[in-house]
Amino acid sequence: MPQFQLRNTVERLDKPSSYAMSKYKKRRRDSNSDPSTRQPSPDLEEKLKDASTLYIGNLSFYTTEEQIHALFSKAGELKRLVMGLDRFTKTPCGFCFVEYYTHEDALDCLKYIGGTKLDERIIRCDLDEGFSEGRQYGRGKSGGQVRDEYREEFDPGRGGFGKKFREGEGYGEEYGEGQ
């Protein structure tokens, strides 16, 4: 009799985000090189088991804290809300962290609010291991999010074209610009 494996048809909501997984894999890779220099960190699934913090992505640059608070407080009482900021200009750059008092409220938020629209944008919600100082700033070279630097299409909710496109880096060279 052939063996078969049961799989879920619906993805788990409390799975780690792609950012958290890449960070975790990088730590594991780095810790394998010299295990004596790094303390063993708990497994990512273990960290997220009781997580009450959510990473909220794909927000408009014009979404306010009040709008986010009004939407996310429907899933439970908010403990803290931290807006993601451009590192240099200190203006919102399209993400935030929402912290609830309980893990159950965070899961309810994933269930009911993740994938809904806010300011005409479908927002992304992921469980996060917890907010720490410094994570509120964008990691891109221009101070915002990395993905916004390379965007070629016009997106009015995220500041128009990407920074590289606006500066003309790598664009127009096929026409002999500057010669």
Image: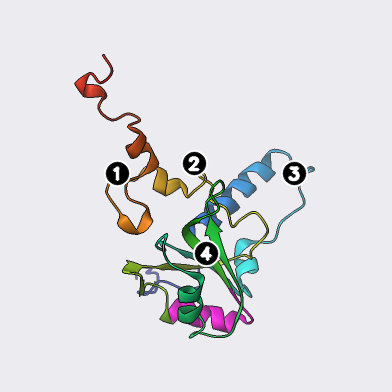
**Residue under pointer 3:** 35
Q: Amino acid at mark 2?
A: Ser
Report the magenta residues as a range: 99-111
Residue 172 vertical placement versus 84 (above, below): above
Determine the residue positioned at 48% across, 61% down.
95
In magenta stretch: residue 101: yes
When asked about the image quadrant of residue 132, the answer is bottom right
Q: Residue furthest right?
A: 36
**Residue under pointer 2:** 142
- Tell me if mark 4 has few (under 14), some (14-19) or many (20+) residues whose alpha carbon lies within 10 angstroms of its own: many
User: Comparing marks 3 and 2, which lies closer to the viewer?
Assistant: 2
Spatial separation of the CA atoms under disc 3 and disc 2: 34 Å
Image quadrant where one finds the C terminus: top left
User: Comparing marks 3 and 4, which lies closer to the viewer?
Assistant: 4
Spatial separation of the CA atoms under disc 3 and disc 4: 33 Å
Disc sitting over residue 152 in the figure: 1
The first of marks 3 and 2 along the sequence is 3
Q: Amino acid at mark 4?
A: Cys
Is there a contact, CB below 8 Å, between mark 3 and mark 2? no
Q: Nearer the viewer, residue 48 or 85?
A: 85
Spatial separation of the CA atoms under disc 1 and disc 2: 16 Å
Is there a contact, CB below 8 Å, between mark 1 and mark 4? no
Is residue 88 visible in the rendered structure shown here?
yes
